[in-house]
Amino acid sequence: MTVPVLPRLRARTLEAPPQPDLFDLLPPDVDPATVVSWVREGDGLIGWGRAAASTDDGMPSGPDRFTAAAQWWADLVEATDVVDEVNLPGTGLVAFGSFAFSPDSPDLGGLVVPRVVAGQRDGRAWVTSIEALDDAGQVSTQAGRSHTGATTVASGQGELADGIRLEPGAVAPEDWPRVIRRAIGRIEAGEVDKVVLARDVRAVADSPIDTVALLRRLAARYAATWTFAVDGLVGATPEMLVRLQEGRVRSRVLAGTVRRGGTPAPSVTEAHPELEDQHTPDPRLHLVSAAKELEEHAFAVRSVAEKLAPHCESLEVPEQPFVLELPDVYHLATDLSGRAADDATSLDLAAALHPSAAVCGTPFADAARLIDELEGMDRGRYAGPVGWLDASGDGDWGIALRCGQLAADALSMRLFAGGGIVSASDPDAELAETEVKLAAMRHALGLGS
Ligand SMILES: C=C(O[C@H]1C=CC=C(C(=O)O)[C@@H]1O)C(=O)O
């Protein structure tokens, strides 16, 4: 057995002036492959450089990927000297992470600690520099070369590669309705109640695709989502798997989608009196009244509530969903909140919740098997947890949706989109739903929405 030798780190957090745009702090010569992000409506965390990564230390694979990363983090926290003048969630030592959807994926993901993290929330801002120490407890020469000048305004960034084109992924779009029909057959045969199926599309470029350009475009158009980047996985997710901050637990569950501008059904529920004008061609009407959408949503909420409840002393689960408005789609959404009852970290909670019915299905083991059989691809870290945690265990973990995975040479990117399939699903509408969910990444790549 190889015992990983952890680096000794020193993390120092200082208060800093708030920034109109966190991405402006990225140094002009930043290595885009190291850029990490978790930003929503201007607040959040970004980072660059690499002080440590769980994958550098030989993490075990498969179902152990979360516990192995959690242990690595606990050991690293123990071995790090921290000076924190701000003391908020996200200050001091922070790791960003993303994890594979499936334990069988070759790309299992893990945690990464940047050299510099800049953060802001509610008018307070800070910069944390993280340096490796040598045996004598001095900053090592290599770490000394890291970027700490977080007030440098980045210039010359944000250029998109020319000539980006889209190519079919594992399943061609015209074949997708046939895959959905097979899934519906299996649902009707009683194998599963719901399965979430996803497809990929390849974006190919003539010159490297710039992570920072993608982030800036996503943050500008999808400000109400969490704009993320970890190890080349870049996107803007509207779904918060779990947030743990100062003992408070929250989760935003999404399931049930309609295109903005789609045709509504002519009925309404009491939960949305503002939609009572039945002559308004409002697609939200369809969302709040269609049995298919409500059923799909209820599956997803139940799966999160059941897994969160053992970790909470109280958990509020609203009876009715609300409609979340995004630039391209409306979603049915439910926000759950509670008080933590144990010492589970945000990463432990994310591991307990993954995979939720919003990305897998119910019952989950059968749905996972069906995904494997029908999708014909490895999801990689799409639909897995993505986010950050600090030394106290507080953190945010979203579900990696509306995203793409950059290839190591940055000359191509796999884009992903999926949807929940229940017995009442319409195969052609499901294809259209994946197309509209791909709009975020098409926009980020400068291909229109
Ligand atoms: C699987 C995806 O969306 C999930 C999240 C929100 C709504 C969903 C739906 O309505 O099917 C999906 O469960 C995706 O965006 O790739």
Image (cartoon, rainbow, N blue to C red):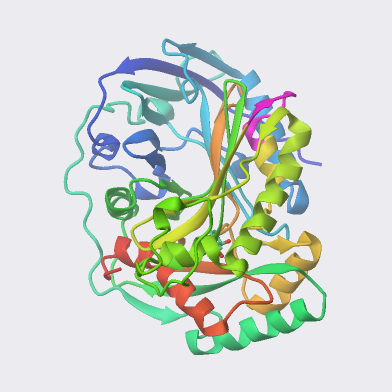
Please say whether residue 124 is one of the residues in the magenta stretch. no
- Which residue is pictured at 69% across the width and 71% down the height? 371
Image quadrant, ligand 1: bottom right
Place residue 392 in its image quadrant. Answer: top right
Residue 399 visible from this viewpoint: no
- Which residue is pictured at 82% across the width and 74% down the height? 191
Q: How many marks?
A: 0
Relative to 412, say whether 96 is above or below.
Answer: above
Q: Which residues are magenta?
A: 338-347
Residue 189, image x and y in percent?
A: 81, 81
Side (left or right) of 418 relative to 17: right
**Residue sitting nearer the eye, 421 or 321:** 321
Side (left or right) of 195 relative to 116: right
Side (left or right) of 399 relative to 444: right
Residue 358 visible from this viewpoint: yes
- Which residue is pictured at 28% across the width and 49% down the height? 216
Image quadrant in which the N terminus is located: top right
**Residue sitting nearer the eye, 49 or 434:** 434
Relative to 200, say whether 146 is above or below.
Answer: above
Residue 325, image x and y in percent?
A: 39, 54
Residue 16, image x and y in percent?
A: 29, 18
Relative to 99, say whether 148 is above or below.
Answer: above
Residue 352, image x and y in percent?
A: 73, 43
